[in-house]
């Protein structure tokens, strides 16, 4: 049950955005730039969504992990298996060695930004990661720690129906983050 009076027909962060449109705009603009806009990163939108989903899973934020996992699935051509693999263990997932090193960095940022070491950066560079990609992985992980704490700190509701997340994933993968979400009946 939410800790404040939120619109019941929107789960997770979407209820918070409907509650506070003035803070929703800059946060939506940020996530649009970080995850969706193709010109802002050499990482694909699917790779960026995987970093967001993985960070959210480490933070045990059901809504964000499941939503961004569903978006990643659609950004990666409908491959939900790779999303499951990354959530279990990025080191053994069927992703590029470069993305594995970036996931390692994201996991360290999730714990404490100071846990990222020069060796982690060197490992990412050795696999072909650019400074921009390292930057983006750190910023996505840090931003999703904020989003996860925002969502869970205010006790937003998370649907249990996987079909809801699939629909959200399809919408966000197609439209990005700047369109209004559809309403969902709260149980």
Image: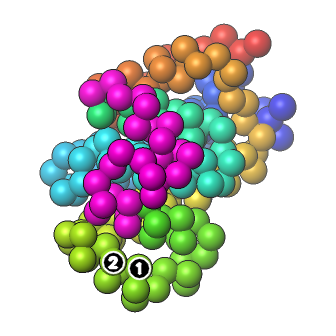
Q: Position of residue 166 (x, y in %)?
A: 48, 20
| Mark 1: secondary structure | helix
Q: Which residues are magenta?
A: 77-102
The residue positioned farthest toward the front in the image shown:
92
The answer to whether residue 2 is left or right of residue 43 is right
Residue 26 vertical position relative to residue 74 in the rendered view, above or below = below
| Mark 2: secondary structure | helix
Q: Residue at x 15, y 51 (%)?
A: 39
Main SS, magenta residues: helix
Tag 1 residue: 120
Residue 114 vertical position relative to residue 97 in the rendered view, above or below = below
Tag 2 residue: 123
Whether residue 69 is visible, yes or no, is yes
Task: Tell me which corner region of the image, top left, top right, bottom left or bottom right, holds residue 113.
Answer: bottom right
Is 180 covered by the magenta stretch? no
Q: Residue at x 54, y 71 (%)?
A: 108
Q: Quadrant of the N terminus?
A: top right
Question: Quick one: 102 or 165, which is closer to the camera?
Answer: 102
Q: Residue at x 25, y 76 (%)?
A: 125
The answer to whether residue 126 is left or right of residue 100 is left
Is 101 covered by the magenta stretch? yes
Q: Position of residue 116 (x, y in %)?
A: 49, 80
Q: Position of residue 118 (x, y in %)?
A: 40, 88
Task: Tell me which corner region of the image, top left, top right, bottom left or bottom right, holds residue 123.
Answer: bottom left
Colouring rule applied to residues: rainbow
Whether residue 183 is visible, yes or no, is no
The residue positioned farthest toward the left in the image shown:
39
Label 1 close to label 2 by CB (< 8 Å): yes
């Amino acid at each position: 049950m939410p800790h404040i009076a939120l619109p019941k027909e929107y789960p997770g962060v979407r209820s918070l955005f409907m509650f506070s449109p003035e803070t929703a705009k800059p946060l939506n603009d940020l996530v649009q730039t970080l995850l969706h806009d193709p010109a802002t990163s050499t990482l694909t939108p699917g790779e960026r969504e995987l970093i967001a989903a993985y960070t959210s899973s480490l933070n045990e934020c059901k809504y964000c992990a499941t939503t961004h996992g569903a978006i990643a699935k659609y950004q990666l051509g409908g491959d939900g298996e790779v999303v499951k693999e990354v959530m279990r263990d990025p080191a053994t997932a069927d992703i590029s060695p470069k993305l594995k090193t970036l996931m390692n960095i994201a996991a360290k940022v999730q714990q404490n930004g100071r846990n990222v070491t020069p060796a982690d950066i060197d490992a990412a560079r050795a696999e072909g990661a650019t400074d921009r990609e390292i930057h983006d992985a750190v910023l996505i992980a840090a931003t999703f720690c904020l989003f996860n704490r925002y969502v869970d700190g205010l006790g937003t509701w998370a649907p249990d129906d996987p079909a809801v997340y699939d629909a959200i994933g399809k919408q966000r993968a197609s439209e990005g983050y700047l369109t209004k979400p559809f309403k969902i009946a709260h149980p």
